[in-house]
Image (cartoon, rainbow, N blue to C red):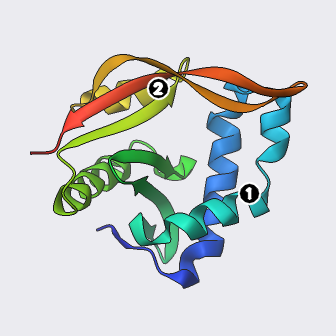
Amino acid sequence: MPRRAAPADVADIVALYHSVWHETQSSFMPAEEIARRTIPFFVERITGLLQTTLVEERSGSIAGFSSWSGHLLGQIFVAPAFRGSNLATDLMAASERAMALEGVTQAELHCVVGNRRARHFYERMGWRHEGESLEKVAGPGGDVDVLFWCMRKSLR
């Protein structure tokens, strides 16, 4: 059962986030953005999102987490050993409930174009693809645009 993250969880969340982001996202990003995604980068990000972060534990360790800001579900990451175990499904459902309790009626997430495994999961969970958006990331000589699928879901 997912629970709200606590300050004591930050190091474990960051370790998971760093590892899984590099595994699942780096093939879609420029080398400069990959280099920017260091442990301190993830510490800063999770520290800022801690109040809206859920964690799921298995055998006393954090096996997955999700975070959001307002209506945007920005992170949902699961350790490789727990993929296919319904952990992601439980975590997504808990995130959607928590967001709805905060007053979010229309949730959004951005999935990097090409990450078909993630998009398929979101669609199975009832999220709809509603176009594409460009997001700035670090690239050669400055910021560059990376294309994301914009996914939305009504939380009513």
Of badges 2 and 1, nearer the viewer stands 1
Q: Is residue 54 something one can see in this rendering?
A: no
Q: Which residue is mark 2?
A: 117
How many discs mark residues in the rendered view? 2
Number of residues whose C-alpha sits closer than 10 Å to that of mark 1, classed few (under 14), some (14–19) or many (20 or more): few
Residue occupying the far bottom of the picture: 8
User: In the displayed image of the protein, which residue is found farthest to the right?
Assistant: 141
Q: Give the residue at x 53% y 24%.
A: 115
Residue 119, horizontal then vertical, whole percent: 41, 25
The answer to whether residue 151 of the structure is visible from this angle is yes
Residue 51: x %, y % from top left: 42, 72
Q: Earlier in the sequence, mark 2 or mark 1?
A: 1
Q: Quadrant of residue 44?
A: bottom right
Vertical position of residue 10 compared to residue 114: above or below = below
Q: CA distance from mark 2 to mark 1?
A: 25 Å
Query: According to the image, label 1 marks what residue?
Result: 41
- Quarter of the image for the C terminus: give it: top left
Q: Nearer the viewer, residue 2 or 4?
A: 4
Nearer to the camera, 91 or 80: 91
Residue 22: % across, % down: 71, 41
Q: Residue at x 64, y 44 (%)?
A: 21
Q: Amino acid at mark 2?
A: Arg
Q: Residue at 79% of width from left, 38% of height from top?
A: 34
- Quadrant of the rendering where the N terminus is positioned: bottom left
Which quadrant holds residue 124?
A: top left
Tell me the SS state at disc 2. Answer: helix
